[in-house]
Image (tube, rainbow, N blue to C red):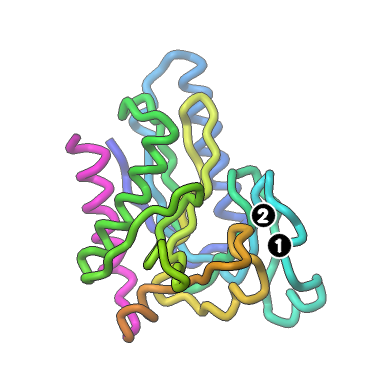
Amino acid sequence: MIKFIDWNLIEYSEAWKKQQEVFDAMIALKMEKKPTEELQQIVYCEHPHVYTLGKHGKPSNMLVNDEFLKKINASFFPIDRGGDITYHGPGQIVGYPLLDLENFSLSLKDYIYNIEECIIRTLAHYGIAADRLQGATGVWLDKDTPRARKICAIGVRASRYVTMHGFAFNVNTDLKYFSYINPCGFVDKGVTSLQLEMGREMDMNEVKALLTKNFEELLLNK
């Protein structure tokens, strides 16, 4: 069982707190050897402009200072997920799967593969060929060319097979905000959005519905 929930536009700090509460509750149930299915959920949301830095990320990948962040109305959070620095903002679908991977017989590696696959299938619906890039978690277009560009970043945290954090899928994202960082630590690769690739503003609810369908197929109908 997975509930699909939409928090809409929510401050990053509030979303982190809400995630943490579910994450802790699921781990508490596991410690007591109780079922966790009832708490499982995949959350969709958007955040006001914010940069987040994973626990092994390099602060030097943030290319601007606090004063400039205020000027562009953005905030900065060091956080407890994997991965380096990334950006979240309006027009980007951020997904937080709060799952117990043991309920799906998934390893962490397989779980990340399934998130990537969900995005790849969603893009295929729009006629866009996307793929994985060796050694770089996430979903990429034209991966083996000088035009390689990332459309979805992935960074997760897991403890006792319970997950939090997740993915950031650029749909109608303002890509100029990526110019103030080395996205995910890369200095030689670009970023893109579904809007840029399609040449039109996308229906966020339509994209979320496709994500839900693909997650259900990948996780529940195996």
> What whole-number distance in Å separates the C-alpha atoms at marks 2 and 1?
9 Å
Taking 27 as reference, is 128 above or below it? Answer: below
Q: In the rendered structure, does residue 206 fall within the stretch colored magenta?
A: yes
Horizontal arrangement in the rendering, residue 64 relative to residue 104 (left or right): right
Taking 55 as reference, is 105 above or below it? Answer: above
At label 1, counting other C-alpha atoms closer than 10 Å, the crowd grade (few under 14, some 14-19, many 20 or more) is some
Name which residue lies at 30% across and 80% down: 198
Name which residue lies at 42% across and 35% down: 109
Q: Locate residue 84, reporting x and y percent.
A: 63, 53
Q: Are marks 2 and 1 in contact (CB under 8 Å)?
A: yes
| Quadrant of the image occupied by residue 125 | bottom left
The residue closer to the viewer here, 219 or 114, is 114
Furthest-left residue in view? Answer: 221
Check disc 2 and report the residue beneath it. 53
Furthest-front residue in view? Answer: 145
Our reading of the magenta stretch's main secondary structure is helix
Q: Secondary structure at mark 1?
A: helix
Horizontal arrangement in the rendering, residue 46 relative to residue 203 (left or right): right
Q: Which residues are magenta?
A: 200-222
Disc marking residue 61: 1
Closer to the observer: label 2 or label 1? 1
